[in-house]
């Protein structure tokens, strides 16, 4: 129940996105062949980003009986989610043209998924957190399978749905055990109960922590909860894969960060062991399995698994600085991965296979240069944002005393250079086999330009993000 | 634990009677099998068939639309019980909720889900 209008004001960004989604659904049949849907989505995302800043400008506060909070942490991720939504909508222009995908419904689903993401990052209670994540995942299942005439797309959607609903069940089981141990689902309430009684050897609590961590690890595709990512990304169209890789990962990291620091802060030792295992496995398995891929989207899926591991390095420390490092990583990772997937999407069928990149530099030097920039950033080569991001998380792991993990991360970075730079070699040192790709549409180019700009600025002045990375 | 003893007794009794009937029937009864008799009994239905049968997708759409109103009713009942306590805010909230549900219905209607052809 709404106690006052000021409660509703906390949810203005979410309401903007949901309202636009409903409007698009109502008008769906009339705007199918027009650019109304993409314009509406981009405008709604901008309005939501502005609104999240506007709401925070009254000061951090909570509403809905302490379930929803507006603070620097949630605002940071809301702006990131809005940017992901806008770029994914712009990048979809090319791939929607060739497919039998209803535009209005597609953009409405993107908007609703983003609504769920925003709700999840501003939750201060396990129940709305789960609700937001569920809204995001339910829309993602449909988005993955929205190219209904393609068997690969259907297969990907079914696999993602089965594994995803299992992971949701695991998460909700962890939430119910947490409630059983502490008697509340409120973050502050759980933290105060745990700090008063201490956990000691409470097996139920350990199981609850493990299950919650596993459920959230699925959202960021960390090993061993990663198996869905390559299949889902390969079957989905490239912009949807970009939206999943960027948005789902950022939200999963945001939720893990809040749960790790604000809920199980007193259990930091248990949590940091879990996160260290997840991070180490993700980095190693992601980097090694990416070596043998010939499908570009599968390669990027394994790369995103490895990046989930790097991002977790910040959270292992269980400190505010560590959480800030992970926030920085999530921010830059979103833009470089959207850029890479954007080039893949814009190249159409040719971009799906690794061989399609042969000789791209000779045919389209500008596009090849953009791709090279994003690949360098994913590898972590200065002066790109990827280097700055990797630097802060590895530094955070070293400060937390995880020297071995830091060495492993650096070593796997070198391994990852092999498969990222293989694409660069194909682009620059091979003769083209296929006809030159047609000119990119304006919206796609605009999105790529924004992603490239953030990637460059992040590399040149890595500290520019520091004022915004407020830990929970 | 005492209240569970009755349940345990009825479990044992029911299981015992059923087991005794099956045991008596299979030991004392005459056996004169035909293929009809050996088939599993399922009230005249074909007990086992491959999922090859076709069903018009129209039924599925209608069922989905029914769920929309079903969900609406599930929320309207408890709302009606506490209507006075919620006051006008509750009325507005329920109006918004029904509005959002109806957007889905209008979408389905608009796209021809109710045309029976």
Image: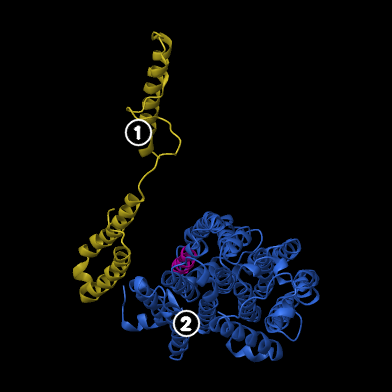
Chain colours: A blue, B yellow
Give residue A6's quadrant in the image.
Answer: bottom left
Report the front residue among A255 and A298: A298
Q: Residues within 10 Å of mark 1 (few under 14, many from 20)?
A: few
> Between A74 and B101, which is closer to the camera in this rendering?
B101
Image quadrant where one finds the N terminus of chain A: bottom left
Q: Is residue A38 above or below residue B8?
A: below
Magenta-drawn stretch contains A416? no
**How far from the left and from the top, in percent, is residue A339?**
63, 78
Q: Chain of mark 1?
A: B
**In the image: residue A255, left or right of residue A428:** left
Label 2: which residue?
A: A42
Q: Which mark is residue B6?
A: 1
Q: Is residue A126 left or right of residue A452?
A: left
Viewer-nearest residue: A232 or A295: A295
Classify mark 2: residues with Cα within 10 Å, few (<14), some (14-19) or many (20+). Answer: many
State which chain disc 2 sits on: A
Query: What stretch of residues is rendered in magenta?
Result: A127-139
Mark 1 or 2, which is nearer the eye?
2
Residue A92, image x and y in percent?
53, 74
């Amino acid at each position: 129940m709404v106690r006052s209008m000021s409660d509703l004001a906390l949810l203005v960004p979410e309401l903007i996105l949901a309202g636009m989604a409903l409007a698009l659904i109502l008008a769906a049949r009339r705007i199918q062949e027009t650019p109304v849907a993409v314009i509406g989505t981009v405008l709604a995302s901008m309005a939501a980003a502005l609104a999240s800043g506007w709401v925070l400008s009254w000061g951090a506060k909570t509403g809905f009986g302490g379930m929803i909070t507006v603070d620097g942490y949630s605002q940071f991720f809301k702006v990131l989610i809005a940017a992901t939504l806008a770029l994914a909508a712009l990048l979809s222009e090319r791939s929607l043209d060739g497919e039998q995908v209803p535009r209005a419904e597609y953009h409405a689903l993107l908007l609703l998924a983003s609504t769920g993401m925003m709700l999840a990052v501003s939750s201060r209670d396990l129940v709305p957190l789960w609700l937001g994540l569920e809204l995001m995942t339910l829309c993602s299942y449909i988005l993955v399978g929205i190219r209904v005439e393609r068997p690969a797309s259907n297969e990907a959607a079914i696999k993602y749905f089965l594994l995803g609903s299992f992971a949701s069940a695991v998460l909700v089981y962890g939430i119910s055990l947490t409630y059983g141990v502490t008697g509340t689902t409120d973050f502050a309430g759980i933290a105060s109960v745990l700090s008063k009684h201490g956990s000691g050897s409470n097996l139920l609590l350990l199981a609850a922590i493990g299950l919650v961590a596993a459920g959230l690890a699925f959202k960021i595709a960390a090993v061993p909860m990663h198996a869905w990512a390559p299949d889902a990304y390969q079957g989905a169209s490239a912009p949807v894969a970009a939206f999943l890789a960027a948005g789902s990962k950022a939200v999963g990291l945001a939720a893990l960060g809040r749960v790790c620091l604000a809920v199980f802060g007193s259990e930091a030792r248990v949590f940091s062991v879990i996160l260290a295992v997840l991070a180490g496995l993700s980095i190693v398995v992601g980097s090694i399995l990416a070596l043998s891929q010939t499908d570009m989207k599968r390669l990027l899926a394994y790369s995103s698994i490895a990046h989930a591991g790097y991002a977790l390095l910040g959270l292992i420390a269980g400190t505010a600085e560590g959480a800030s490092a992970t926030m920085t990583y999530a921010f830059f990772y979103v833009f470089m991965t959207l850029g890479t997937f954007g080039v893949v999407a814009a190249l159409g069928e040719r971009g799906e296979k690794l061989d399609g990149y042969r000789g791209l530099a000779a045919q389209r030097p500008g596009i090849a240069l953009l791709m090279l920039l994003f690949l360098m950033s994913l590898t972590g080569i200065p002066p790109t944002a990827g280097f700055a991001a990797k630097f802060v998380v590895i530094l955070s792991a070293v400060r937390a005393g995880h020297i071995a993990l830091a060495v492993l991360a650096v070593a796997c970075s070198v391994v990852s250079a092999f498969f990222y730079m293989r694409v660069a070699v194909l682009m620059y040192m091979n003769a083209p086999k296929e006809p030159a790709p047609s000119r990119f549409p304006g919206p796609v180019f605009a999105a790529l330009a924004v992603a490239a700009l953030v990637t460059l600025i992040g590399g040149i002045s890595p500290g520019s993000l520091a004022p915004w990375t407020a830990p929970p | 634990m005492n209240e569970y003893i009755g349940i345990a007794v009825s479990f044992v009794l029911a299981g015992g009677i059923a087991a005794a009937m099956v045991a008596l029937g299979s030991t004392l009864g005459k056996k004169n099998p035909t293929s009809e008799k050996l088939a599993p009994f399922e009230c005249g239905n074909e007990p086992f068939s491959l999922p090859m049968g076709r069903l018009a997708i129209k039924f599925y759409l209608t069922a989905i639309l029914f769920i929309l109103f079903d969900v609406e009713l599930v929320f309207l009942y408890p709302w009606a019980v506490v209507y006075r306590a919620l006051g006008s805010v509750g009325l507005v909230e329920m109006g918004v909720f029904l509005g959002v549900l109806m957007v889905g219905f209008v979408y389905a209607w608009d796209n021809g889900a109710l045309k029976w052809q």
